[in-house]
Amino acid sequence: MDRAQKEKVVEELGQIFESSGVVVVAHYTGLTVAEMQSLRAKANEAGGAVRVAKNRLAKIALEGKPCESMAPLLTGMTVLTYSEDPVAAAKVAEDFAKENKKFEILGGAMGETALDRAGVEAVSKMPSREELIASIVGCIGAPASNIAGAIGAPASNIASILSTIEDKAA
């Protein structure tokens, strides 16, 4: 890898560290190519991505970024799982770690907050952005549907009363 390629990798990693809601660092020693492809596919489904990079280049890219505190985790054969959604990458990494004992989560970062192994697990149990939006919309929509039901109910009651009166008159 020549200097220009290294600079490009550092720039790409810098953008990842800057724009990601969460970055999870894990060791992947012993994973097969198929298992790695499975991890990448699961991350893509969840709106995240997986990146293997040289630790030295990743540490350079971390300088001055919000998640700089995770630099000590970058030792050995590491893989980065990241996503804009603050929960998606952590969920993907946790689920994958349960299936594959060779995939060992070290920690990560969520913005400026460094996460240890337990922190990544806690983040993975939080509801995702989509789940939160759905629950908020449900809360907002419920009163509106109750109001619509209350407004519509008297009209249907009046209609059934008029129908009953009409039946008796006939």
Image: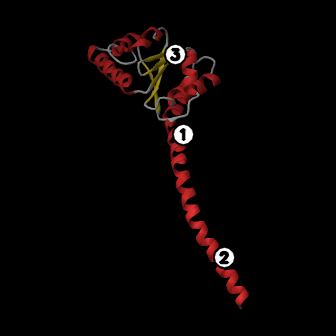
Q: To which residue does mark 2 refer?
A: 160
Q: To which residue does mark 1 refer?
A: 131
Determine the image quadrant of residue 161. bottom right
Q: Is residue 61 visible?
A: yes
Looking at this view, name the residue that lies furthest to the bottom.
170
Tag 2: residue type?
Answer: Ser
Left or right: residue 9 versus residue 124 is: left
Instruction: Answer whether labels 2 and 1 touch (C-beta < 8 Å).
Output: no
Name the front one of labels 3 and 1: 1
Q: Is residue 104 visible?
A: no
Which is more N-terminal, label 1 or label 2?
1
Mark 3 residue crowding within 10 angstroms, few (<14) / some (14–19) / many (20+):
many
Which is more N-terminal, label 1 or label 3?
3
Task: Give the spatial CA distance, label 3 vs label 1.
Answer: 24 Å
Q: Position of residue 102 (x, y in %)?
A: 60, 16
Q: Nearer the viewer, residue 104 or 148?
A: 148
Q: Which residue is drawn at the image coordinates 41% and 22% (left, top)?
A: 111
Tag 1: residue type?
Answer: Glu
Q: Which residue is drawn at the image coordinates 50% and 28% (left, top)?
A: 89
State the SS at label 2.
helix
Q: Quadrant of the C terminus?
A: bottom right
Tag 3: residue type?
Answer: Gly
Which is more N-terminal, label 2 or label 3?
3
State the SS at label 3.
strand
Q: Position of residue 129 (x, y in %)?
A: 49, 36
Instruction: Answer whether labels 3 and 1 touch (C-beta < 8 Å).
Output: no
Mark 1 residue crowding within 10 angstroms, few (<14) / some (14–19) / many (20+):
few
Task: Give the spatial CA distance, label 2 vs label 1.
Answer: 41 Å
State the SS at label 1.
helix
Q: Quadrant of the N terminus?
A: top left
Q: Position of residue 55 (x, y in %)?
A: 41, 11
